[in-house]
Image (cartoon, rainbow, N blue to C red):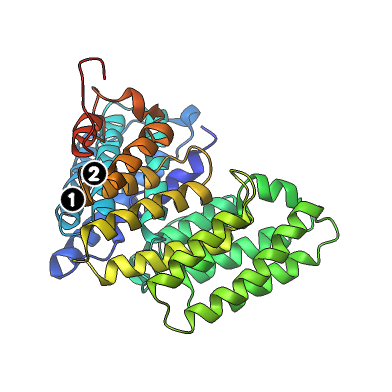
C-alpha cells in the first residue's frame, strides 16, 4: 500500500476537454462523487468505519456513468485515446467492485492506476487549464501532507502545470535530495516531460537545468546529461519559435536515438520529448492524413514512449500507440513491426501481452495479429 497516496489523484481524466452543457453536468456529478469517495479510499485500514452502502453505490454509479460518457467521447478521438478510455473504463469498474466488496486495498491499487491514466492523458498536448474543476477538488483535499511527487502528479492531472513545476523545482533543488536518488526516482524526467509537453517557452526548464548543473554533488554522468539537455533545449526552442514542420520532428526523433548510447539512457530525452510533442501536434492537426503516414508516426510515438517512460508503467501508453499503428494501416510492414514490439514490450495490468492471445483483458492480441497480416495458428 505504498502507492496509496497516489489514489488521491483518481478520475481527473474525466476533466479531459469534452464539449457542451452535458459535460458541465457530468463534471459536477463527478466532483460530488469524488469528494465523497476520496476519504473512504484513503482511510486507515486499522480505523475503518461502516460504509453507507446505499450512498457509496450511488456515487459509484455516478462514476460508472461518467466513464460511459468518456467512452462515447473517445469514439470520436484518435485510436490511442480510444484505448486509454477503454482501459480507464475497466479500472473504474474494478474500483467500483472493490468498494462494493469493501476491499480498500484493491480500491487503492485501482485508483492509483487510474491516476496514472489521468497524467498520461493530460500531458499529451498543451491546452488550457480546467481550473474550475481542479481548484474545487484541490480545495477539498489536505494535499500538504502528500509527498512532493504525488502532489506534482495531482497538479498535472488537474492541469495546473506551472504549479507542478514549482513543486518539482523545490524538490530537485533541495540540498538533501541526492541527484542520483532523484534520477533513480525519475524526478528530472518527470520535470522535463511536464515542461516540454506543456510550455511554449522553455526558458523555465532551461533555468532549472542551469541551476541543477551548479550542484556540487552532481556526479559526472548526470553533469554530462544536463549539459546535453541545456544545449538541446536551446535548439528545441528555436525550432518551436519557427513554426516547426513534420520534417523537424522526424529529425529530432533521429537525434534523440543517436544521443542515447544504451537502452534506458536519458541523454536524448529533450529531443525525444520534443519530437513526440511535434508529432502529436501534426496528428491532431491532420486527422485525415494518409493512413500509412499516420501508422508510421504512431509507431515512432510508441518508440519515443518506450525511450522516455519509466520501466513497467501502469498506463498502457506505448501499447496504445502500437495498437493505433496497427489499426491505422492493417496488413502492412508498419503494422507487423508494431505488433512485434507489442508482443516484446507490451504489458497490461502486469501481464505480458505475448501471453494474452486468449484472455483479451484489454487488447485483443489475436485480432491485432490478424489485422497485422500475421497468420494465427492454433498454438498462437
Disc 2 packing (10 Å; few <14; some 14–19; many ≥20): some
- Judge whether 122 appears above or below 278 on screen: above
> What is the secondary structure assignment of the residue under circle 1?
helix
Disc 1 packing (10 Å; few <14; some 14–19; many ≥20): many
First reached walking from the N terminus: tag 1 or tag 2: 1
The residue pinned by badge 2 equals 86
Tell me which corner region of the image, top left, top right, bottom left or bottom right, holds residue 297.
Answer: bottom left
The residue pinned by badge 1 equals 71
Q: Are marks 1 and 2 in contact (CB under 8 Å)?
A: yes
Residue drawn at the location 68% of the way across and 64% of the way down: 228
Residue extending farthest top: 379
Q: CA distance from mark 1 to mark 2?
A: 7 Å
- Judge whether 199 appears above or below 39 on screen: below
The C terminus lies in which quarter of the figure?
A: top left
Residue 109, position in %: x, y? 41, 34
Tell me which corner region of the image, top left, top right, bottom left or bottom right, holds residue 377.
Answer: top left
Residue 153, position in %: x, y? 49, 55
Residue extending farthest bottom: 242
Residue extending farthest front: 333
Residue 158, position in %: x, y? 40, 62
Residue 38 showing in the rendered view: yes
Name the foreground residue: 255 vs 18: 255
Seen in the image, is 177 located left or right of residue 70? Answer: right
- Judge whether 199 appears above or below 102 on screen: below
Count of numbered circles in the view? 2
- Judge whether 322 appears above or below 290 on screen: above
Amino acid at each position: 500500500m505504498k502507492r496509496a497516496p497516489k489514489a488521491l489523484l483518481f478520475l481527473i481524466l474525466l476533466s479531459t476537454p469534452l464539449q457542451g452543457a452535458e459535460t458541465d453536468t457530468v463534471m459536477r456529478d463527478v466532483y460530488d462523487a469524488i469528494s465523497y469517495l476520496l476519504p473512504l479510499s484513503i482511510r486507515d485500514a486499522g480505523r475503518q468505519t461502516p460504509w453507507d452502502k446505499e450512498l457509496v453505490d450511488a456515487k459509484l454509479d455516478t462514476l460508472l456513468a461518467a466513464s460511459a460518457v468518456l467512452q462515447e467521447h473517445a469514439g470520436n478521438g484518435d485510436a490511442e485515446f480510444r484505448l486509454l478510455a477503454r482501459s480507464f473504463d475497466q479500472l473504474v469498474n474494478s474500483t467500483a467492485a472493490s468498494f462494493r466488496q469493501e476491499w480498500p486495498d484493491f480500491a487503492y491499487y485501482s485508483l492509483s492506476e487510474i491516476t496514472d491514466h489521468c497524467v498520461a492523458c493530460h500531458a499529451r498536448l498543451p491546452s488550457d487549464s480546467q481550473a474550475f474543476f481542479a481548484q474545487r477538488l484541490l480545495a477539498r483535499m489536505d494535499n500538504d501532507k502528500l509527498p512532493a511527487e504525488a502532489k506534482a502528479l495531482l497538479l498535472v492531472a488537474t492541469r495546473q502545470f506551472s504549479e507542478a513545476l514549482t513543486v518539482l523545482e523545490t524538490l530537485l533543488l533541495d540540498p538533501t535530495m541526492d541527484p542520483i536518488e532523484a534520477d533513480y526516482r525519475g524526478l528530472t524526467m518527470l520535470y522535463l516531460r511536464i515542461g516540454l509537453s506543456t510550455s511554449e517557452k522553455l526558458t523555465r526548464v532551461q533555468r532549472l537545468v542551469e541551476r541543477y548543473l551548479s550542484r556540487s554533488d552532481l556526479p559526472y554522468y548526470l553533469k554530462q546529461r544536463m549539459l546535453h539537455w541545456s544545449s538541446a533545449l536551446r535548439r528545441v526552442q528555436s525550432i518551436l519559435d519557427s513554426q516547426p514542420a513534420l520534417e523537424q520532428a522526424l529529425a529530432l526523433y533521429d537525434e534523440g536515438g543517436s544521443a542515447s548510447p544504451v537502452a534506458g539512457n536519458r541523454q536524448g530525452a529533450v529531443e525525444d520529448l520534443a519530437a513526440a510533442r511535434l508529432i502529436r501536434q501534426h496528428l491532431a492537426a491532420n486527422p485525415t492524413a494518409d493512413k500509412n503516414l499516420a501508422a508510421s508516426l504512431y509507431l515512432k510515438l510508441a518508440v519515443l514512449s518506450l525511450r522516455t517512460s519509466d520501466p513497467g508503467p501502469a498506463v498502457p501508453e506505448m501499447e496504445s500507440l502500437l495498437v493505433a499503428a496497427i489499426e491505422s494501416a492493417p496488413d502492412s510492414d508498419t503494422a507487423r513491426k508494431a505488433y512485434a514490439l507489442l508482443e516484446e514490450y507490451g504489458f497490461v495490468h502486469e501481464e505480458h501481452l505475448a501471453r494474452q492471445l486468449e484472455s483479451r483483458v484489454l487488447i485483443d492480441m489475436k485480432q491485432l495479429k490478424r489485422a497485422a497480416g500475421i497468420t494465427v495458428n492454433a498454438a498462437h
